[in-house]
Image (cartoon, rainbow, N blue to C red):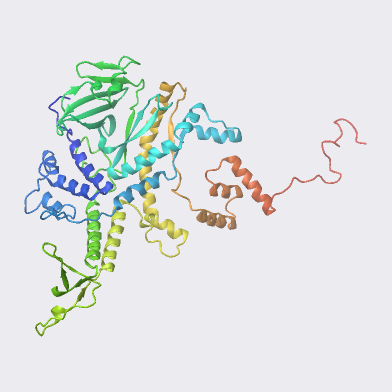
Amino acid sequence: MNRTDDWPPKPQNIALAQQSLWSAWWVGDADGLRSAYAATGSAGGYEAQTKEHSFEPLTSRQGGLIPTIARLFWGRPSVGSGRKAGLHVPIPADIATASADLLFSEPPQFVLEGEDNLRKSMGENYVPSKSQARIDEVLNDGGFHSTLIEAGEVSSALGGGWLRLVWDTEIEQHVMVEAVAADSAFGEWRWGKLMAVTFFTEFKDKATDQEVIRHLERHESGAVIHSLYRGQVDKLGPAVDLASHPDTAGIAEMVGKDGVTLDEATRQVTIPTGIKGLTAAYVANMRPQRRWRKLPGICELGRSDFDGVEPLFDALDETYTSWMRDVRLAKSRILVPEFMLTNMGKGGGSAWDEDQEVYAALNVAPDKSANQITAQQFAIRVAEHADTADALIDQILDAAGYSPSTFGRGTEGMATATEVVSKERKSDRTRDKKCRYWSQTLDPLLSTWLELDALVFKTGASGQVETKWADTTQADPLQLAQTASALRVAEAASTKTLVAMQHADWDEAEIDAEVALILDESGRSVPEPLPFAGEHTDENVPPEGTEPE
């Protein structure tokens, strides 16, 4: 890279422009939404980017992108000096949170390949292998599970997310997995496979307030490369020493240790990882990416849950804003004739004393309506707004791939377990598809993590890591009990099978102990039979070759 390089690089600038819009919906700040749509519709923004990639330029006043954005609620320019009121309904944030909950409210378990078979074959005598013990210590832990929840929410909103491996012996005695937002890195792909990724962090230069300092961290096979650039908002600028900024000075101090090298020409610091695997990975929220399917370099990115739903978000905000406008306009007001106002003196205006009891009568024209107190209060169109909002929300959730019942909608009255399951099917299908994308990312990355962790911290662990997902997001105990009862009546399952169904997280010993208690309490346990009178036992059987007495 050199000082003339454009920033962001192409075609990643197109993805960043769209991700900034999704981010504005996710954050839900009214000013942020106005700014995002203003940037999208401005010359040199989305319009200029699409021209470069042979999109049809629709930017005339009669039709096209800019007039289309202006017709949106958040895209309309303010008239005059005032800023129009706007109310945002945080349904995009609710969708992102629900997506993370569906995936990780019951966290997946990570196991070494073949460890399940070992556990089953050894039963109560099972002892985790060294590698599995390390996996349990670090990955099957609340800290990593929290990281996955964070990554799941970001991925839902921005169409995907990055996971990278980092290590610092002063902080943790294991390699850490960090979640990074999709709009903070650029990937390099070959035949759909991630070959390298560059993470970037931007700092404003406090001295000039004009220049932008960017730290680029490139992960490729066998190495992590750090570099620092001083440029402008739209230019990367020349490379500078990593030691010149406090956030990267620590990396410069690593040169000469553990094989870390400095390229004097490019001022890049290379940290060897000692492994072939890539120490970063991208997880797609959903594919295919319809917007950029013909654009190499970004067609591999995932699709946001907000993709194509933005106009419905906009209409819902407009509906609620109109509803609240009705509330404001419908506040009770009274109109009083001018003679009822008290003069507050020169420059003080007039005021009405609502507690005054006596007013001087005026000799006015026969029409006395102007002398009367008039109450004014407009109607609030509650039903119309509520019905419109409900229809929009249902359409939003359907377009995003979720069942309304996931968000507590449409659950009025008593519903059978079958009805509840039926209403949740769309959300379950969406979750199943996302689980596949996450497994495709987690399995190879965590296998690389195990290898890198063993190299850095001398654990001796090795092997391939597999992700085991829970069958459902949350099993309903009542529904499980009803199913177990039906199977018991039909004599279609043993007591042990029913206990295992009700307690999926129990091991073999706990299940066997519970079965024994159930059989004892129900009187169905059968004691060992006693020998019949006169029956030969080991004690009274005469030795072979002797006659009985």
* Outermost residue to the right: 549
Q: Is residue 466 left or right of residue 90?
A: right
The extreme top residue here reads 256
Residue sitting farthest toward the front: 345
Look at the picture and state if 132 lies above or below 45: above
Confirm whether residue 113 shows in the render. no
Establish if 397 lies above or below 296: below
Q: Residue at x 25, y 38 (%)?
A: 183
Give the quarter of the figure containing the C terminus. top right
Q: Position of residue 46 (x, y in %)?
A: 14, 43
Residue situated in front as seen by the camera: 311 or 231: 231
**On-image quarter of the N terminus:** top left
Residue 448, x across and y down, in percent: 38, 28
Please state if 427 lies on the left or on the right of 396 as rendered: right
- 92 displayed left or right of 543: left
Report x, y in % for residue 233. Answer: 16, 34
Residue at the location (24% across, 28% down)?
215
Q: Quadrant of residue 213?
A: top left
Q: Is residue 119 visible?
A: yes
Residue 337 falls in which quadrant of the image?
bottom left
User: Splitting the image into 4 quarters, where does residue 314 fall?
Assistant: bottom left
Is residue 469 found left or right of 197 in the rendered image? right
Farthest residue in the left direction? 61
